[in-house]
């Protein structure tokens, strides 16, 4: 990536886990990342890199005062959407049925962040870039290629995101995609919206990251050897070959070998 992310575009992801070092080791071995636990004055936040460029963050689950949560929150990946005015975006979030969970807060000179929930219950982040724009590599092996919202109310989700950020939504033209919509920025697809009903009963609304890989079956096997489980085994679909995996601490993510054109 060269230059800032356009508002509404997924620009960063991070993972909150009980065992930070174990998560760093798992994803580094799986995707070729490099990561180290950060300094205490940064909450130990680890910025993982690929080819020297930032690709994702991993942090230890903790309360704001640094104590261990009880009960421990679920291990989840958070997708951050770019904004050029976080305070105004937050007002739009609450004005359109969403809620603010954390923030806004300054992250040194790196930028401003907040964590919010949409009206259907899906949690996501907002990022206003300072000196840090977000993921420095995307759409290649081991890096983010796609982000997808699963929701029980697609019309409400479409209306919400179009109201808080300069995005539009359009039904996908991919064959066999079912009720699937693209989130677009300036006419370019940057994320997807799918029906929560296609997932196991009880799954909450969520944003799920997809990582690009050269061989889905090989990554799936490597993940299982490292203690992960398989939520949806490797299969072929319109956009490519993919699998849905759950890391050893329960974090769900997808891997895909995309057909030409996805993520371009």
Image: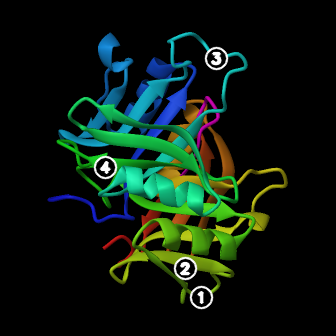
Gap in angstroms between the C-alphas marked 1 and 3: 44 Å
What residue is shown at x 69% (from left), y 50% (from top)? 231
Highlighted magenta segment, given as a residue range = 247-255
What residue is shown at x 20% (from left), y 58% (from top)? 4
Q: Which residue is mark 3?
A: 69
What residue is shown at x 32% (from left), y 36% (from top)? 33
Of callouts 1 and 3, which one flags the residue occurring earlier in the amino acid sequence? 3
What residue is shown at x 31% (from left), y 27% (from top)? 35
Residues marked 1 and 3 touching at CB (< 8 Å): no
Say which of marks 3 and 2 sits in front.
3
| SS at badge 2 | loop
Which quadrant of the rendered structure holds the N terminus? bottom left
The quadrant in which residue 214 appears is bottom left
Q: Is residue 203 left or right of residue 214?
A: right
Gap in angstroms between the C-alphas marked 4 and 1: 36 Å
Q: Which residue is mark 1?
A: 175
Q: Which residue is mark 2?
A: 238
Gap in angstroms between the C-alphas marked 4 and 3: 28 Å
């Amino acid at each position: 990536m060269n230059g800032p992310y356009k508002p509404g575009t997924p620009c960063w992801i991070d993972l909150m886990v009980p065992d930070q070092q174990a998560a760093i080791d798992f994803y580094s071995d799986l995707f070729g990342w490099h990561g180290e636990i950060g300094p205490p004055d940064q909450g130990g936040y680890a910025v993982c890199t690929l080819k020297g460029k930032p690709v994702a963050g991993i942090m230890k689950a903790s309360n704001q005062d640094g104590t261990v949560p009880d009960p421990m929150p679920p291990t989840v990946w958070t997708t951050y959407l770019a904004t050029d005015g976080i305070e105004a975006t937050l007002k739009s979030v609450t004005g359109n049925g969403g809620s603010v969970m954390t923030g806004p807060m300054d992250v040194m000179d790196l930028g401003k962040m907040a964590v919010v929930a949409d009206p259907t219950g899906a949690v996501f982040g907002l990022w206003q870039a300072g000196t840090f724009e977000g993921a420095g590599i995307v759409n290649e092996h081991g890096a983010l290629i796609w982000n997808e919202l699963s929701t029980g109310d697609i019309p409400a989700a479409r209306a919400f995101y179009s109201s808080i950020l300069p995005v539009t939504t359009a039904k996908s033209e991919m064959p066999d995609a079912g009720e699937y919509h693209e989130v677009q920025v300036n006419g370019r697809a940057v994320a997807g919206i799918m029906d929560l009903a296609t997932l196991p009963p009880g799954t909450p609304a969520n944003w799920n990251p997809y990582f690009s890989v050269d061989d889905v079956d090989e990554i799936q096997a490597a993940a299982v050897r490292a203690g992960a489980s398989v939520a949806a085994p490797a299969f072929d679909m319109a956009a490519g070959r993919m699998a849905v995996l759950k890391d050893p601490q329960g974090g769900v993510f997808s891997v895909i070998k995309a057909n030409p054109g996805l993520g371009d």
